[in-house]
Image (cartoon, grey):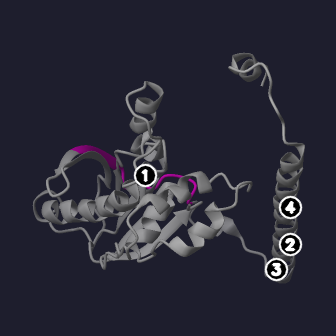
């Protein structure tokens, strides 16, 4: 804070104490609501646990440990010619194939992130016989933020990422279908794909499952000057998109798991 004040170009800084108090009250409300919700969940889970029969987990497979399939990895450098979009995809797959069709999971990274950040998770899942694809989302990844800090871009992420991200997922499924017969000997189950994602990736997963952008709700939320919801800094950028109904539903996606979606 002292460095900020030292670098401030004017000699005088006016502080609106009334607005600060409003912001403080909003933050306090969020903290109180979070504490209440956490306490309620803790009480309910404790009650359910007390009323449930004890479980001997030693009799079950320890999913915290890698399984026995072994893991291989490839990196695909791809170009979607329809969008002139270049991206890479890290693909993890088992060394030993299971009987029958192999399930496929695609994971979408968040803002200022990259596929490598989720490599350990992908390896772990692949060790249980899954094929896991981690696509890069250029325009909202780590490289985009690096470009911002180096003065090569003026945006933390490109607004069109709300459109390009879910299309990246469908493009990766298309690519897996193209390679299935030759590289995977037709083993992949691409009619029932699972998609997961974190933060902006959570939005991506929901979008390919059929979720749409609620522009009216966003306008209400983004019109609030002081509101302690940092994710709105990302969400409100969607208001810059042309107003139309965006539908990125991919019928090949059968399930999604969104982690902290925006």
Q: Which one is closest to the eye, mark 4 or mark 1?
A: 4
What SS does tag 1 mark?
helix
Q: Quadrant of the C terminus?
A: bottom right
- Sequence-first tag of 3 and 2: 2
For the record, the magenta segment spans 63-76
> At x 20% / y 55%, what residue is drawn?
83
Q: Is residue 188 magenta?
A: no
Q: Can see residue 4?
A: yes
Mark pair 4, 2: CA separation: 16 Å
Q: Which one is closest to the eye, mark 3 or mark 2?
A: 2
Residue at which label 4 appears? 29
Mark pair 4, 3: CA separation: 29 Å
**Residue 109: percent from the left, percent from the top?**
45, 51
Question: Pointers 4 and 3 in contact (CB under 8 A)?
Answer: no
Mark pair 4, 1: CA separation: 38 Å
- Viewed as shown, does residue 169 lie left or right of 144? left
Residue at which label 3 appears? 48
Q: Which one is closest to the eye, mark 4 or mark 2?
A: 4
What SS does tag 3 mark?
helix
Q: Can see residue 130?
A: no
Figure check: 12 above or below 242: above
**Residue 108: percent from the left, percent from the top?**
42, 56
Q: Which mark is residue 122?
A: 1
Residue nearer the viewer, 38 or 228 = 228
**Residue 191: percent from the left, percent from the top?**
27, 77
- Sequence-first tag of 1 and 3: 3
Determine which quarter of the picture holds residue 100: bottom left
């Amino acid at each position: 804070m002292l460095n900020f004040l030292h670098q401030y170009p004017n000699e005088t800084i006016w502080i609106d104490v009334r607005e600060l108090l409003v912001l403080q009250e909003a933050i306090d409300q969020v903290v109180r609501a979070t504490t209440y919700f956490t306490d309620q969940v803790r009480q309910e889970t404790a009650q359910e646990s007390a009323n449930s029969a004890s479980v001997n987990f030693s009799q079950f497979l320890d999913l915290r440990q890698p399984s026995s399939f072994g893991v291989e990895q490839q990196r695909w450098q791809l170009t979607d010619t329809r969008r002139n979009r270049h991206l890479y995809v890290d693909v993890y797959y088992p060394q030993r194939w299971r009987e029958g069709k192999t399930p496929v999971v695609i994971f979408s990274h968040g803002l200022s992130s990259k596929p490598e950040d989720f490599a350990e998770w992908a390896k772990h899942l692949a060790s249980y016989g899954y094929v896991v694809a981690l696509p890069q989302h250029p325009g909202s990844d780590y490289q985009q933020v690096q470009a911002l800090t180096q003065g090569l871009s003026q945006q933390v992420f490109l607004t069109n990422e709300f459109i390009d991200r879910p299309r990246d997922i469908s493009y990766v499924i298309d690519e897996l279908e193209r390679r299935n017969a030759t590289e995977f000997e037709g083993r992949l189950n691409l009619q029932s794909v699972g998609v997961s994602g974190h933060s902006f990736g959570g939005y991506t997963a929901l979008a390919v499952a059929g979720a749409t952008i609620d522009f009216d709700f966003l306008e209400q939320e983004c019109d609030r000057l002081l509101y302690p919801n940092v994710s709105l800094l990302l969400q409100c950028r969607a208001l810059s998109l042309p107003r139309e109904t965006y539908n990125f539903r991919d019928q090949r996606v059968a399930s999604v798991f969104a982690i902290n979606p925006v």
